Amino acid sequence: MKKTKKIIAISLSLVMIFSTNILVRASTPLKNTLTNEDLISTQQQLQDGIYKFSYDEMDGTNIVKTDITYYFVDVEKINEMNNYIKQRTSYNYKSKLDSTMSYEHYTRVYYSESGGSAKVTKVEGGYIRRDQTVSVVSQKVIIGQGNLGTSNSTTKNPTSSSWSYSTSSWPYINVSAGAVMGARYLITLKRNAGAWTSEVDNYVYNNVASPW
């Protein structure tokens, strides 16, 4: 059984860090137990001071999904948080369990930013098998970046449990007026005669319609 727990924090100057049992006033923007791997905010939400984190924990035999949202209205604190996030990592990580919890699949989207421009440089991913009665039929990876006038994309079909694709030759695109940038990873699974597909979407920017 999977349960969902939602926590919302509003802060003007201090970061309020919640966990299952404690409330901590942090002297730094992010507590070590909350990392960019848990960050699910879009780039626009980050600019607006909205920081969303989501992660799964085991509670006995149950998987508990915890969602934490921070709202900052202090411009200085928003800038501090954004700079801190950029310093910690240059990739976005996203993972997902399929509907039967038989496989976990994940992606890391590496990117580079320069002023108001950015580009995808590499995407890594793969899957972890949790149920030996379920097999992988196929995999599909769509990597792309685009704004209102420029678009780059590529589609791959990996055949192993882990993969990596470079897009370092792609140009920087202007993201200041809106962009979509990231990867979609689809994995088709099969048990006996039944098949189904699970998808994990991982976007660095996602505030215009995707052209791919």
Image (cartoon, rainbow, N blue to C red):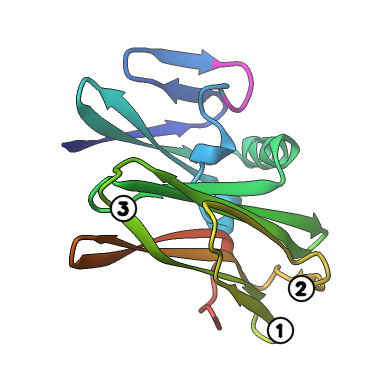
Given residues 85 and 79, the one toward you in this image is 85
Q: Are marks 1 and 2 in contact (CB under 8 Å)?
A: yes
Q: For the image shown, how many numbered marks are present on the structure?
A: 3
Q: Is residue 23 above or below residue 128?
A: above
Name the amino acid, label 1.
Thr
Label 1 element class: loop
Q: CA distance from mark 1 to mark 3?
A: 33 Å
Residue at 20% x, 25% y: name it.
61
**Quick check: 81 left or right of 61?**
right
| Separation of residues labelled 2 and 3 (CA atoms) | 33 Å
- Tag 3: residue type? Asp
**Magenta span: helix, strand or loop, mainly?**
loop
- From the viewer's side, name the closer residue of 6 and 212: 212
Give the quadrant of residue 76.
top right
Report the Cα–Cα distance between label 1 and label 2. 7 Å
Disc 3 designates what residue? 98
Q: Quadrant of residue 13?
A: top right
| Other-residue count near label 3 (Cα within 10 Å), few / some / many at <14 / 14–19 / ≥20 | some
Location of the C terminus (image quadrant) = bottom right
Residue 121 x %, y %: 75, 60
Instruction: Give neighbour class at mark 1: few <14, some 14-19, many 20+ (Cα, 10 Å).
Output: few
Q: Is residue 129 above or below residue 30?
A: below
Q: Position of residue 108 (x, y in %)?
A: 60, 50
Q: List the residue tagged with mark 2.
A: 173
Q: Please state the extent of the stretch shown in magenta in the rendering.
A: 26-30
Amino acid type indicated by mark 2? Ile
Instruction: From the top left corner, tell me how far across and down residue 93 is, in percent.
Output: 56, 46
